[in-house]
Amino acid sequence: MVRTGSVAGPTLAVVAREAGVSVPTASKVVNGREDVAPETRRRVTEALDRLGYVRKPRFDSAKSPGMVDLVVHSLESSWSGAVLHGVEEAAHDAGLEVVVSAGLTRTRGGRPERGWLDKLSTRGSAGVLFNLAELTQSQYAWLEQHRIPFVLIDPVLEPPPGVVSVGAANWQGGVTATEHLISLGHERIAVIAGYRRKMCSSARVAGYRSALAAAGIRHRPEYLRYGSFNEVGAHRRMLELLDLPEPPTAVFVCSDKMALGTYRALAERKLTVPDDMSVVGFDDLPEAHWATPALTTIRQPLSEMAATAMRLLVRLMAGERPEGTRTELSTRLVVRESTGKPPGSAQGVERP
């Protein structure tokens, strides 16, 4: 249970004693001050987490009603650019300013820093949007204690009950991608997924398996490969698939960025897309257009997801509650040049 710094929980003096520092030094860490040595900050932060100390709620949305925070996983990807575009557009319509932070920094021990939370409270933003964030239970409790409205955009893990989130119809996207390959005549269809525990990854794999089952195609366990959402992991998984006694003729890759890694693996083996291997991605990022050949992919409406999350946040800030806590936007297939009939198939087998 997360406790506040009150009679029912540890005081700042208790935290300071636990960390072996003075109360003023502990206070500096709690308030996000920069003039604290890294090692001292680490000790105090660990003591705060260990004891379950949370600052008394001081958040007041009236302090800065025209500002919200957007916490993104990274600022270096086209994914984040699409999210930022959607948030800014919806925020402009609502007359709000957006403060962008990149990532939830972590300590050397792997625990999330408290500094960004404390700065959030000090800044007095009216609400927060989290994109691809993996919040801890203590962070959820902190947001609740401080009565800060927040919405998750494409959460990594299943959020706690009552938390508002926006995502894409990932299961249906997995179904659609696989059905497209089946319609071209493919039966040896592999899938390269992202992190196994990530919500979107497991949903896309479930859609893939459902489409195979509906078509009467046996699922081959060796055709299911998990990695990470990057080119390097997908490159390795594609090489593993190519080394199978009976490699696939098509692969559904659970992100466009990963699909580029499969392209590289195929090129290294002197195989071409789509003559030797059909490839379907997921996202419809700019990389899908730039790839050679252009990538067939499942479009998820990232900017629309972000704009929807912003509008939901505005409602929460106004004291309203949406009808449901999970909003899913539709995905759709975008056919380009990376998919075709199986190799050696003159006409293929067209299926509805």
Image: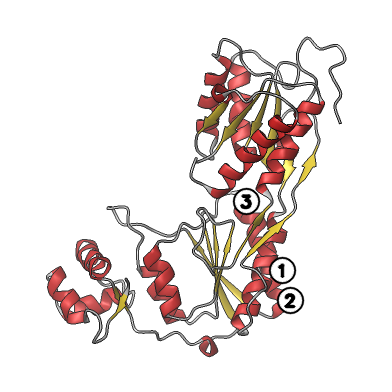
Q: Are marks 1 and 3 in contact (CB under 8 Å)?
A: no
Residue 50, quarter of picture: bottom left
* Res. 289 visible in picture: no
- Residue located beneath label 1 in the image: 89
Amino acid marked by disc 2: Asp
Q: Residue at the spot x=53%, y=26% of the render?
A: 237
Residue 36 locus on image (x, y percent): 24, 70
Asked if the residue under mark 2 is in contact with the one under mark 1, i.e. CB atoms within 8 Å, the reply is yes
Q: CA distance from mark 3 to mark 2?
A: 22 Å
Cα distance in 3D space between marks 1 and 2: 6 Å
Which numbered dot is residue 188?
A: none
Q: Give the number of the disc on residue 79.
A: 3
Q: Position of residue 138 (x, y in %)?
A: 37, 67
Q: Mark 3 touching mark 2, by CB under 8 A?
A: no
Question: Which amino acid, mark 3?
Answer: Trp
Q: Quadrant of residue 305?
A: bottom right
- In this rendering, the answer to whether 86 lies above or below 315 is above
Q: Amino acid at mark 1?
A: Glu
Q: Residue at x 65, y 23 (%)?
A: 218
- Residue pictured at 66% horizontal, 31% vertical: 252
Q: Residue under label 2, please give it.
A: 93
Assign a secondary structure to mark 1.
Answer: helix
Q: Is residue 17 left or right of residue 316?
A: left
Q: Residues within 10 Å of mark 2 (few under 14, many from 20)?
A: few
Of the 4 image quadrants, the one containing the C terminus is top right
Residue 189 x %, y %:
67, 24
What is the crowding at mark 1: few (fewer than 14 residues within 10 Å), some, or many (at least 20)?
Answer: some
Mark 3 crowd level (few <14, some 14–19, many ≥20, 10 Å Cα): some
